[in-house]
Amino acid sequence: MAFAQKSFFYMRQPNKHFQAQLTMNTMQKQIQRFTSTRILRIALTIALCSILAMPSTTHADGTIVILNGTSSAGKTSITKELQKIYGNTYAFVHGDYVETYAYIEDPLIKAGPMDIRNQLSFDALLHYVKTASQNGTNLIVDIVQSDDKYERDFSALKCDKLIKVLVYCPLDVIVNHVAKRNKSGIEAEKRNIFQSVSQFNDIYKLEEFEYETVVDRIQTNSIKQVLCLSQQEIEFCIQTEWQLTEKEAIEERQKAKLFALEFIEQFQLDRLEEIVLVPKKPWDLILNKALYSSEECAEIIKRYLD
């Protein structure tokens, strides 16, 4: 089923031509009221036209800093450190709450596939960021963005001052981050391992060329262990948390198994003892959360911006 995309977020801009016309009409009436000679009216009208024709003062676009990475990589903790540095000179946009940027009215879309709703909401978030930047606001945006929408999403922002930062974290460290978040007792903070693993292969790939930027060198056994944990996690959800029919449960198990096989093939986990990871797309900065604290990462970003 095809869904028509709706526009949900627009910051109404003043119509300068309409305002100028209103001003012109008002001023002409005042001129007619307080002057008696036609020559003076013409002179004042010409002067007024000259003033209105002058270019209006515009502000420069704000800087947009994109923090991208898998779920639980440490983007939010870096954002908190950046807030301490920049305060209210930057607006902070969190992709975890992307649905708050779009109000979807169409009942067919509401009841449709989640990926369609998520994409519409994400498009609205991008529109919000672009509009805010064009109005002179600096923004730091915490998102999870896969490689297949890299060009489309970043070109949509239409910002010359766009800084793209990739926050990398090894999967075995992410497992610890997920466990810590889930023990916090905050429902909104809860995550699962499979979420991070499924995003991992969207962002990273094996090194193919010498000129590629190496993110990490990893023993394949550590990745296999995390992949196994993610599969156990899905099985636990199927049996205890998800309300599924027997047919749906079988389908979920098949999808999980297929994903695991594709993941193993993509990173050659059954053939290599060590793999060299590189990002699929170019980034201005790559921060390794296994090497740097959130505070250090924030300082690196500050130095880059300065």
Image (cartoon, rainbow, N blue to C red):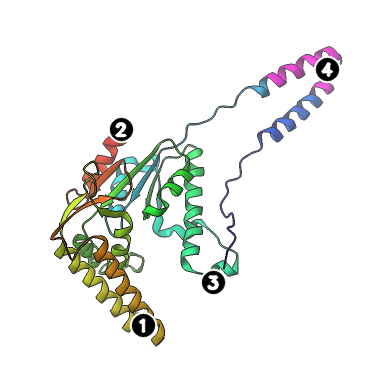
Which disc is residue 111 wearing? 3
Dot in front, 4 or 2: 2
In the shown orientation, is residue 229 left or right of residue 247? left
Dot in front, 1 or 4: 1
In the shown orientation, is residue 94 left or right of residue 54? left
- The residue beneath circle 4 is 35
Q: Nearer the viewer, residue 283 or 274?
A: 274
Q: Which residues are magenta?
A: 31-50
Circle 2 packing at 10 Å, graded few (<14), some (14-19), many (20+), is few
Name the magenta segment's main secondary structure.
Answer: helix
Which disc is residue 250 wearing? 1
Disc 1 to disc 4, C-alpha distance: 87 Å
- Label whose residue precedes the other's in the sequence (4 or 3): 4
Q: Nearer the viewer, residue 117 or 203?
A: 203
Residue in the picture at 35% in, 80% down: 241
Where disc 3 sits, the SS reads: loop
- The residue beneath circle 2 is 306
